[in-house]
Image: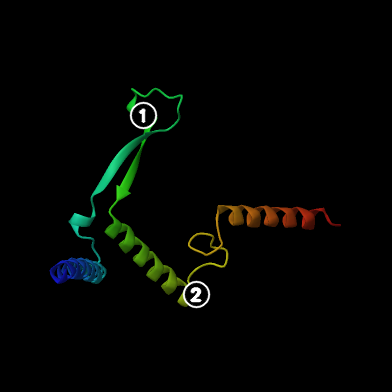
Amino acid sequence: MSSRRCRNYTADMASEIQCQSSGAISVLAFSWSLQHGTVPSSMKSAYVTPILKKADLDSSDAKSYRPISNLSVLLKSLERLVSQQLVAYLRENDLLPDRQSAYGAHHSTETAVVRVLSDILLALDSTLQF
């Protein structure tokens, strides 16, 4: 019974060490990538899947498909890290325009369209007043 418990404990420990090691390797890879301003070629691979654009298109025609690229989890994580750091830097240094819709929490193309429509209506109102 005790040897069984020991084997389970050892397997759990090995799994934990492997998890911590892969996390440490990820941190090292991210740090190296940010310091050198480049992404290791091993992280640049993607699985590309062709998806039919519309169901009524000719499936034998290559132009009927659009490529969907599935990037590695590490690359997506690095991309998110860089994006967060860049946006934080831009905000801290007041480099984002007030009406910047991208990269902002609770902002989307809808909020951009609403702002443009509002500006147009305000301009029309101001020209129609005598």
Identify which residue, 29 or 6, lies in the foreground: 6
**Residue occupying the point 24% across, 68% down:** 23
Instruction: Mark 1 or mark 2: name the one nearer the start of the chain.
Output: 1
Answer with the quarter of the image where residue 11 lies: bottom left
Give the numbered dot on residue 63.
Answer: 1
> Could you say which disc has been placed on residue 94 in the image?
2
x and y percentages locating residue 18 in the rendered image: 19, 66
Callout 1 secondary element: helix
Does 62 sit above or below residue 24?
A: above
Q: Amino acid at mark 2?
A: Asp
Compared to residue 52, the image places residue 21 above or below, namely: below
Check the image and name the residue furthest to the left: 3
Circle 2: is it few (<14), some (14-19), or many (20+) Cα within 10 Å?
Answer: few
Where is residue 72? Give x, y as percent.
27, 54
Secondary structure category for the residue under label 2: loop
Which numbered marker is on residue 128?
Answer: none
Distance from disc 1 to disc 2, alpha carbons, whole Å, reads: 44 Å
Q: Kindly indicate the quadrant of the structure image that contains residue 75.
A: bottom left
Q: Nearer the viewer, residue 88 or 24?
A: 24
Q: Residue furthest front?
A: 1
Q: Residue at x 36, y 29 (%)?
A: 63
Q: Is residue 99 left or right of residue 7?
A: right
Q: Is residue 70 left or right of residue 91?
A: left
Quadrant of the snapshot with the N terminus? bottom left
Look at the image and tell me in which quarter the C terminus lies: bottom right
